[in-house]
Image (cartoon, helix red, strand yellow):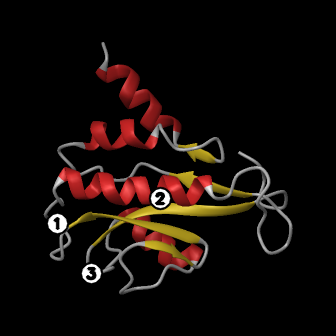
C-alpha cells in the first residue's frame, strides 16, 4: 500500500444501520478518519462505511442487503481509478481491515470484497482466512 504522502488513504469500516459505528473499525474510523456518527453508509471524512448490522448494532443484516452495500462500495472505489485523483492530485486508495468478524457469513463477505478494484488494499488476514477455508 502506498504511504500516506503518496496517496489519499480511505479507511473502510463496518457499522450498523443507525450509523452508530460501535465496531472496532467503526470506532477507529470516528477517531482517526473523521467518520460521522449517525451516518450509516458511504463516504464520510476520510472513511467509507459499509453497514453490516441492523439498527440494534448486533443483528446481522440479511446477506442480500450486505451484498448491495458492498457492491455500492466497489462501484465507488472503481470511480477512483488510476485517472481519478483526490482534490490535491494524489491517487485515492481504500484500506479494508477485517470487518464483519461477528457475521456468520463473513467468508462470503470477504469473497465479495475480493472483487474490489486494485486501488483497494485488503488486510492480509482476510486473504489468509479465505485460503485456510479452502483446505
**In this image, 68 relative to 85: left or right?**
left
Q: Within 10 angstroms of label 2, few (less than 14), some, or many (20 or more) residues?
A: many
Q: Mark 1 vs mark 2: which is more N-terminal?
A: 1
Quadrant (top left, top right, bottom left, bottom right) of the N terminus = top right
Q: Point out residue 61 in the picture as x, y percentages from the top left corner.
A: 18, 60
**In the rendered image, which residue does mark 2 sit on?**
73
Q: Can you name the residue that lies furthest to the top here?
A: 135
Callout 3 secondary element: loop
**In this image, 5 relative to 35: left or right?**
right
**In this image, 133 relative to 60: left or right?**
right
Residue at the image point whose x is 35% and y is 87% from the top? 38
Quadrant (top left, top right, bottom left, bottom right) of the C terminus = top left
Determine contact: label 1, label 3, CB under 8 Å: no
**In the rendered image, which residue does mark 3 sit on?**
18
Distance between the alpha carbons at the discs numbered 2 and 3? 18 Å
Q: Is residue 75 above or below residue 40?
A: above
Residue at the image point whose x is 41% and y is 69% from the top? 26
Determine contact: label 2, label 3, CB under 8 Å: no
Q: Within 10 angstroms of label 3, few (less than 14), some, or many (20 or more) residues?
A: some
Name the quadrant containing residue 77. bottom right
Q: Mark 1 vs mark 3: which is more N-terminal?
A: 3
Callout 2 secondary element: helix
Which label belongs to residue 58? 1
**In this image, 25 relative to 119: left or right?**
left
Residues 40 and 5: in front is: 40
Q: Mark 2 vs mark 3: which is more N-terminal?
A: 3
- Mark 1 vs mark 3: give the one in front: 3
Q: Point out residue 98 in the picture as x, y percentages from the top left corner.
A: 41, 48
Name the quadrant containing residue 39. bottom left
Amino acid at each position: 500500500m502506498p504511504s500516506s504522502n503518496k496517496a489519499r488513504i480511505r479507511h473502510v469500516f463496518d457499522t450498523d444501520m443507525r450509523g452508530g459505528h460501535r465496531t472496532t473499525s467503526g470506532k477507529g474510523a470516528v477517531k482517526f478518519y473523521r467518520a460521522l456518527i449517525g451516518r450509516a453508509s458511504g463516504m464520510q471524512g476520510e472513511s467509507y462505511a459499509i453497514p453490516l448490522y441492523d439498527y440494534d448494532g448486533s443483528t446481522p443484516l440479511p446477506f442480500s442487503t450486505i451484498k448491495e452495500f458492498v457492491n455500492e462500495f466497489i462501484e465507488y472505489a472503481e470511480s477512483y481509478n488510476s485517472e481519478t485523483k483526490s482534490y490535491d492530485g494524489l491517487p485515492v486508495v481504500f484500506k479494508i481491515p477485517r470487518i464483519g468478524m461477528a457475521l456468520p457469513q463473513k467468508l462470503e463477505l470477504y469473497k465479495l470484497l475480493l472483487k474490489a478494484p486494485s486501488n483497494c488494499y485488503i488486510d492480509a488476514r482476510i486473504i489468509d482466512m479465505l485460503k485456510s477455508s479452502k483446505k
